[in-house]
Amino acid sequence: MKRKLISVLCFIIAFGINPAHSQLFKKLKEKVNETVDKTISPADSGSTSNDNQAATGQSRQAQQINFGTYSIITLPAMDPSVINEKHQQFEDQYTGYAIKNNDIIGTVIIYAGNEEGEWGNFSGNSSAYIFENGKMVQHTTVANEEKKTDSLRDANNRYDWPYGYQKNILDPVKSLQKVLGSNVQCMPVGFIANRDKSKFYSVVGIIGTEDDVPYFLVAYDGKKIKLPSAASGLISNIDFSGAAVYGFVKTYEENKEKDSNVLHAATNSLNQGDIYFIDGHVIKNATNISAGGAAWLDPSGKNYLTADENFGAYINGKKIVDKGPHAGHVWCNADAAHWCYFNDQGDHSGHLVFSDGADIPNAFHPVQIILNGKNYMVWFSYSNVTDGNLLLCKKLL
């Protein structure tokens, strides 16, 4: 039994139970990447920052996007007529989303000024215009606006993957004993909790009289499901209403019997295997389950998504695109019949590509928002790809 526990702990330590997995797997990925001819833009693209572009729409070329063809709803994101300063700047980091009065609200902040200063083209006294769905709601200074930008970024942690992820912010054993019983001897090998510490999930071994330690996925409300073994991957959906486990030690041990190379066996166990969900359903033998180290659940908690710019994007183990999307840049509806991904290859900040064929160039800051039980993709675009009116766009997923 001790030898079994040592094997389990070695696998868990090596491949870390967190969204990024382990440094070992990252090193393997880096070696693979060295042999790949990279044509991918930087991961954090999506920024549009040019003087006067936000208001006057100066750009390299003009192309019309026919949003109506794919049932894309558009609204003005800002009103350029209220800005009179010479220099203007807009970046996607100055955007945010909220639900107010049963509607999706897109917030845009424009910096503007007539002289240069410590903020690039702006000083602390330069203007900052804050718009919600095209209507100016506040005209303040750049210095005062910084707090608004910080709050926007914080609010978007619930929309932008990895959703303000935190781990080990509670005492795992104490939290588990509250739901399993104070007399239960447990050995957590993975633990994640939401930001306000009200919900958690854990992969835990329950120590008893059995020779082999049984492992379970345990939820904050006491629900638990039996697992084949300990595992190296534990993830949740955006509101912690669902969780899933993958990368099982049992699969690793089976692979090790076929391939004596420990690194190969561990990698193979993360690239293909079963996925167990807290609601009891299991996806058997899913392909590329770790996708280079990034995996997450859709808002329903029923679908397992992975993405890597070189290895491709997968939903429930099925590939939807060969390469391009980065971690967190794949979305689907609850039954996974409709999906989209963000691919930042090419000259524009990115293409938002939908399963119905819609391909929106120069889309930026795409997120998935659920309103009245419906899944929407929401993002910002210019009406003519790189110029024209700045628009808030939404489309049913």
Image (spheres, rainbow, N blue to C red):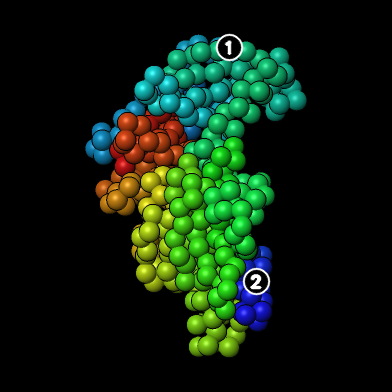
Looking at the image, is 41 positioned above or below residue 27? above
Residue 363 placement: quadrant: top left
Q: Which residue is mark 1?
A: 139
Which amino acid type is shown beneath numbered disc 2? Answer: Leu
Dot 1 or dot 2: first in sequence order is: 2
Position in image of residue 370 (x %, y %): 37, 36
Position in image of residue 293 (x %, y %): 55, 62
Assign the N terminus to one quadrant of the image: bottom right
Q: Is residue 354 left or right of residue 155?
A: left
Nearer the camera: disc 1 or disc 2:
2
Position in image of residue 42 (x %, y %): 58, 51
Which amino acid type is shown beneath numbered disc 1? Answer: His
Disc 1 element: strand
- The residue sitting at 60% across, 85% down in the picture is 261
Disc number for residue 39: none
Q: Is residue 333 left or right of residue 32?
A: left
Assign the C terminus to one quadrant of the image: top left
- The residue sitting at 58% across, 70% down in the picture is 208
Q: Which residue is mark 2?
A: 9
How far apart are the alpha carbons under marks 1 and 2?
A: 56 Å
